[in-house]
Image: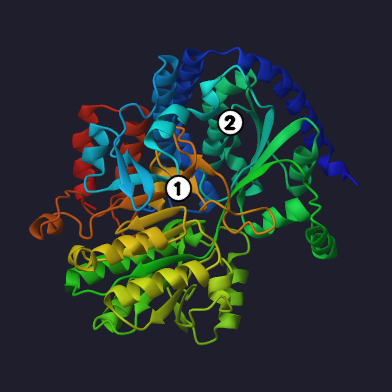
Amino acid sequence: MVTKKAEPALAAVDIALSELVEGEKKWAATSLAGRRALLDQVRELTGRHAQEWVDAAVGIKGLAASSPLVGEEWISGPYVMAAGLGALSKTLDLLARGESPLGNATFGIAGDRITVDVLPASPFDALLLNGFSAQVWLQRGVSSAAARANAGLAQLDPTRTHGIGAVLGAGNITSIAPLDVLYELIAHNRVVALKLNPITEPMLPVFTEILAPLIELGAVRLLTGGAEVGGYLIDNDLVDHVHMTGSARTHDAIVWGTGAEAAERKQAGTPKLTKPMTSELGGVSPTIVLPGEWSAADIAFQAEHVATQRLHNGGYNCVAAQAMIISADWAQKDQFLAAVRTALATAPARRAYYPGSDDRVAKARESYPRAERLGPSGERLLVTGLAPSSDEPLLAEEYFAPVLGVVELRGTGPEFARAAARTANDAFVGTLGVNVIAKPDTIEQLGAAFDELVEDLRYGTIAINAWTGVGYLTSTASWGAFPGHTIDDVQSGIGVVHNAWLIDRVERTVVRGPFRPAPRSLLHGEFAISPKPPWFVGNKTAASTGKLLAGFGADPGWLRLPQIFASALRG
């Protein structure tokens, strides 16, 4: 039964889809060079309207315009969008010239898999993210020759389009929805109907301005409305494919229905939605801390690192760390946990803007009545003494709220590394991302055991001395769950996005960063000049640095670098 209130929105869906049918023909007739020109226009518009973008995001999240936390919106909004457009534009240029996007790529080997270096991808990357690197690992059996030949995905035959894709946008990070649109359009060669999440509907005017070249061609349509509109959209016979970002619970409601209906359908293997569906969902992301001998400065920095992994964007990130795995036998365990408490407690206050956050925190308090309440009003929880078991509520459900747990395992050295990987794989729900924090000499001492730890972790993004969010910010990296999930056990989703070099058969991305910020990194033999990252929740110049980075993303140039470095060094 359609409600009267929803009738105009449903009519808008019908109009949008009929227009996309015609738009698909125009998109199919657009050459690779023409598509690249469209992306370049969108990139220029992203820079032009970046301030409007951030203003709208700040309004959604209730941030003070003067808060350093506004830097999160610059970096995870227009910066990553502009950077992604630039990388995709280069890929289309190479394809138009008959070259592979991986023609000049550097390949390596990790165990029995081929890897591709995706960061740094330019001299600018090498300076702006000095000390950070990323590799995409290909699935077993994929050779470097096959990777080169198949890079480009659906753009290898641009005239062969694949219908209309419906994208159900995320409600947390404002760049997710437009980046998902780009991936549908370019990687899969589908025209796109994007339905914004109701939380992000204030972004509609900005997205309309930025995506105008694609909208005018008829390749993209933007829609608003609630679940009724989303259901109507994806059920429409004109829609060939669905992509969503959100929770596994929402995914299952779409695919299987709810309540008794869902149980019956799952048992019978008869999904409610029979169209192909990809997804980027959340999970309970671990942070593994390998024991070592750390200085007081190391402990303070890494404690803020963990607080950032949990509290960035208020904790409303699919890949926010929800539990640490640490050694019960680490001599500095108590010192580190004390520093984490301080970092969680003193991180800047912010409004719980995401619907249901307070209820989820209350649910966590109900499960863990002895949880420590931290933060300006006790809204952040630290839960210690967790069992390394999938029966533990905190490990079995993504809270999507500022709740952090601690799992302690016995052992040190290779014994602990093996136990940590086993726990992360078997006790934590989801496979989107895992963080590993380890002092460089600990990594060196572990040797092959550390390599085995990384190989054993079944996650779509693994970040070593970095946050997995860096993988999200790296346009040439893949972003998504570890492959192998199905609609009846979806975990953190199916498929990948971003992946601006359009690499086929991706398994994971592995990100590496410096253990210490400059200048301490240089003093301890790490060849990295990056200061405290601007995405850290305690970075005092994050807003100014983020704004400068967004300008650079839209229009890179050497003359922009001094201002960025000057701002970043004051953080």
Q: Residue at x 45, y 44 (%)?
A: 141
Quarter occupied by residue 492: bottom right
Q: How is colour applied across the structure in the image?
A: rainbow
Quarter occupied by residue 546: top left
In the image shown, does 566 or 120 lie closer to the viewer? Answer: 120
Give the vertical position of 253 relative to 498 (above or below): below
Is 339 left, or right, of 48 in this rendering?
left
Q: Residue at x 76, y 38 (%)?
A: 233
Q: Position of residue 131 (x, y in %)?
A: 22, 48
Say which residue label 2 marks: 188
Residue at the outermost left position? 523
Give the vertical position of 414 relative to 500 (above or below): below
Quarter occupied by residue 232: top right
Residue at the outermost right position? 1
The mark nearer the N terminus, 2 or 1, is: 1
Is 154 left, or right, of 566 in this rendering?
right
Which label number is shown at residue 140?
1
**Can the viewer see residue 207?**
yes
Q: Which three-letter amino acid code belongs to the residue tagged 2?
A: His
Report helix, strand or loop for mark 2.
loop
Q: Position of residue 116 (x, y in %)?
A: 35, 40
> Which mark lies nearer to you, 2 or 1?
1
Q: Residue at x 60, y 82 (%)?
A: 366
Contact check, label 2 and label 1, Cβ < 8 Å: no
**Disc 2 versus disc 1: distance between alpha carbons?**
23 Å
